[in-house]
Image (cartoon, rainbow, N blue to C red):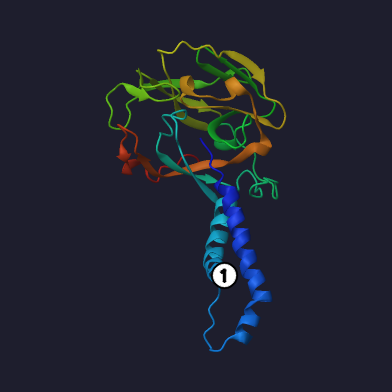
Amino acid sequence: MIHFDFEFLLVLGTLGSGLIWLIDHFMFARQRQKEATSKSVHDPIIVEYSKSFFPVLLAVMILRSFVYEPFRIPSGSMMPTLLVGDFILVNKYDYGLRLPVIHTEITGGEKPKRGDIAVFRYPKDESLDYIKRVIGLPGDHISYYNRRLSVNGKLVKTQLLETYQGLGESSELVINQGCDNIKAKCKVFNEELGETSYTMMTNPDVRYSADGELFVPSGHYFVMGDNRDHSNDSRFWGFVPEENLVGKAVMIWMHWDWRNGGTGLELSRIGTRISD
């Protein structure tokens, strides 16, 4: 999930417009009123813009930083749960509130649970936001062999459901995940991880080589994509530090895929809950 530093620009715009409005109010506005030859006094254009934009920017910053933040899904790593073109809302307070830009924690929150879909700052490049499913909690023993997942020595239950059919596609799935137009008869499974049940899929045409096992260190999480054979996740780059958590994905509020061959606006996905 590619991240554009809108957060920094939003904070900068809010602070800038607020300071201009505040400085003008206490230092220049009264003087202009005294020097005016008529009852109608016009503020400088920069002050007018600041008065107009500051309340809007402040409201957006508060909502985006402390309540819900919108994201768009740009890749297929979370298929079939999340598709390219899904616009999702991310709960910013469940995992604890953090100040924008500097990310200092100001309130504690719940800890992520196994099965949560979490957005986090990619540990290898924190300018990027990633979205994956939380598989392992601190202290867990994770094992993944031959496309079968085990947590703390217990094999995670899976049940084959179907061969995946994309929106408006044939029975063959077209994946554009780091390679162009790979057609694969991907198998969709229901997977039960603790109290959470969800769908994931594998691609039998891919020769898989990321088998192994590990222990999740304290203060970290092990995450995986639901599109198991087409996901860049903890199997390849390691764990997610707790301080990198951004929030929990909770709902799809729109789907619009404008790529060549994309489905365009898909009304059936609007309002789909991702997690509670």
Q: Position of residue 136 (x, y in %)?
A: 61, 27
Q: Nearer the viewer, residue 10 or 61?
A: 10
- Seen in the picture, residue 4 relative to 144 is either above or below; the reply is below
Q: Is residue 17 left or right of residue 83?
A: right
Residue 39 in view of the camera? yes
At horizontal 52% and vertical 44% (from top left) the residue drawn is 90
Check disc 1 and give the amino acid type.
Val
Q: Position of residue 12 (x, y in %)?
A: 61, 54
At horizontal 53% and vertical 70% (from top left) the residue drawn is 45
Per the image, the residue denoted by label 1 is 47
Q: Nearer the viewer, residue 132 or 176?
A: 176
Residue 116 in view of the camera? no
Q: Residue furthest right?
A: 218
- Picture quadrant of residue 194: top right
- Seen in the picture, residue 18 relative to 147 is either above or below; the reply is below
At mark 1, the secondary structure is: helix
Q: Position of residue 154 (x, y in %)?
A: 59, 19
